[in-house]
Image: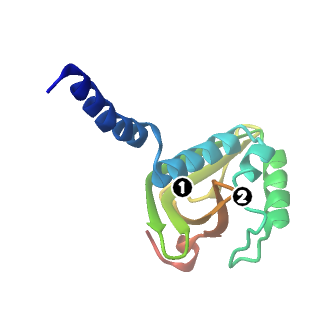
Amino acid sequence: MSRKTVIILLLLLSIPLAIYLLMPSDAKRIRKLVGEGREAAIQKDLSRVMSLVSYNYRDRYGFSYLYLKETLKRIFKDYDSIEIDLKRLRVDLDSEDGKAKAKFLLKAVGIKNNDREYILGTEEVYESVFLTLKKERMKWRVVETYLPTREGLIF
């Protein structure tokens, strides 16, 4: 084989490999979204948190996008700072309906005047959180939240 042929073969093999390694998978994008949401909530940045939520958000607890926004605004205003402990993040993609599920355990603590109050979870128990996500305008957005721990189910 000539030198030119070897170079062309290397390029043909390396381009798909580079694309695969450099382009994050949907699961990685969703993990990043959950991490960004956690950081935005810790910083009490309402606009950043809500940028991760779909305008079509609706859950089984009666929350819509606007109601969720107002609730978070009140929580951010009520506490001096917020601590969030998130673990066991798992992402499941469903190619049939174009949605994904992110499941994780969460403790959220609000601190006000040096007093700690649990917003989600307790000292002993993490809250199970299931997020349903849908791709909108090339970005994953949260369309529903489900808290099975509140119904006696543990993830």
Label 2 secondary element: loop
The disc placed on residue 87 is: none
Q: Which one is nearer the viewer's eye here, 154 or 10? A: 10
- Residue displayed at 69% across by 45% down: 41
Residue at figure coordinates x 74%, y 50% from the top left: 51
Considering only vertical position in the picture, is 148 above or below 28? below
Q: Residue at x 62, y 65 (%)?
A: 134
Mark number displayed over residue 106 = 1
Q: Residues within 10 Å of mark 1 (few under 14, many from 20)?
A: many
Q: Amino acid at mark 2?
A: Val
Circle count? 2
Q: Identify the mark nearer the N-term, 1 or 2.
A: 2
Nearest to the observer: residue 116 or residue 127: 127
Q: Give the CA distance from mark 1 to mark 2.
A: 18 Å
Residue that numbered label 2 is attached to: 53
| The quadrant where residue 55 appears | bottom right
Side (left or right) of 103 relative to 116: left
Rendering coords of residue 75 (x, y %): 79, 52
In the shown orientation, is residue 134 left or right of residue 3? right
Question: Looking at this rendering, what residue extends furthest in the top direction?
Answer: 3
Quarter holding residue 2: top left
Q: Quadrant of the N terminus?
A: top left
Which residue lies most toward the left here?
1
Q: Position of residue 131 (x, y in %)?
A: 58, 64
The amino acid on which the numbered mark 1 sits, given as a three-letter code, is Leu
The C terminus lies in which quarter of the figure? Answer: bottom left
**Are the residues flagged by discs 1 and 2 in contact, CB closer than 8 Å?**
no
**Camera-side residue of 97 and 44:** 97
